[in-house]
Image (tube, rainbow, N blue to C red):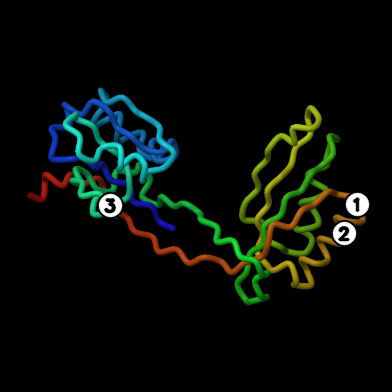
Amino acid sequence: HPIVQCLLTPRPLDPRHIERVYSHAQALGQCREFLAAQIPQAQQVICASTSEAARNIVSITENWAAIAPKRAASLYQLYCQWESIQDQAYNETRFVLVGRQPAELGGNDKTSLIVKTTDKPGALYLVLREFAERQINLTRIESRPSKQRLGEYIFFIDLEGHVLSPTVQEVLEALAEMRIELKLLGSYPKGNTVRQVTKHKSMQETV
C-alpha cells in the first residue's frame, strides 16, 4: 500500500519554532532527509504508531508536530503543514490480512515460508537451488538469527505461486527430503499497488 507521510501540527507553525516531532520509528526513518533539511532542531520522539503521534499533539499549546498520513489530519482536526515528506517517492508498506481459511488457488498468487538452515557451507544455496531449477521467482528473502544456536539462521521467503501449485509442491517435497525445517505462513493473492510520484509541498505555499 502506498504511504504518503505528512507533517501535521495543531495549528500553522513557523518550521524554525517546531520543538518536537512525534511518529513511529519507521515513519521517522522514511522522512530522515526531510527532517534534516526542514526542521533539524526538532527532537524526534518515537511512538507506537503514527495515529498515536497525531493524538499526542491534539489540543496542545506547545510547538509540536507529528508525522502521519493526511487522513489523520481530518480525524484529529490537525493542520497539514507539509504533504508528501517521505524521502522516497515509491514509499510503500506491506499489510497482511490474516484469515481463518486458506486462500484458494488463483492465477496470481504468492506464498510466504520460513526456512531454517543448518550452519554449514552452501546450506542456503541448496534451498534456493530447488526454486531456481523450477523457475520459481523469489520476491523477498530476509534472514534472522534463530536464537537457538550461534550462527544458525531462519529465512523469511516470499515466492510467486500458490502452495497447491505442482511446482511449489515439488520444492516443498524436495526440501522435506533434505530434512530442511520449513513452516508455511500461507498463500494469498498478490496485492495491487498504485504508485504516485509527488514532491515535498508545504501547505503554506498553497495558501
Rendered residue at 92%/56% (across/down): 177
Residue 14 at x, y percent in the picture: 13, 32
At numbered mark 3, what does the secondary structure look like: helix, strand or loop?
helix
Rendered residue at 66%/75% (across/down): 104
Give the residue at the far left of this rendering: 207
Residue under pointer 3: 70
Q: Residues within 10 Å of mark 3 (few under 14, many from 20)?
A: many
As displayed, is residue 201 above or below residue 186?
A: above
Q: Residues within 10 Å of mark 2 (few under 14, many from 20)?
A: some
Name the amino acid type tagged 1: Met
How far is the residue under mark 3 from the one under mark 2? Answer: 48 Å
* Rendering quarter of residue 155: top right
132 or 32, which lies in front? 32
Verify CB contact (< 8 Å) between mark 1 and mark 2: yes
At numbered mark 1, what does the secondary structure look like: helix, strand or loop?
loop
Residue under pointer 2: 174
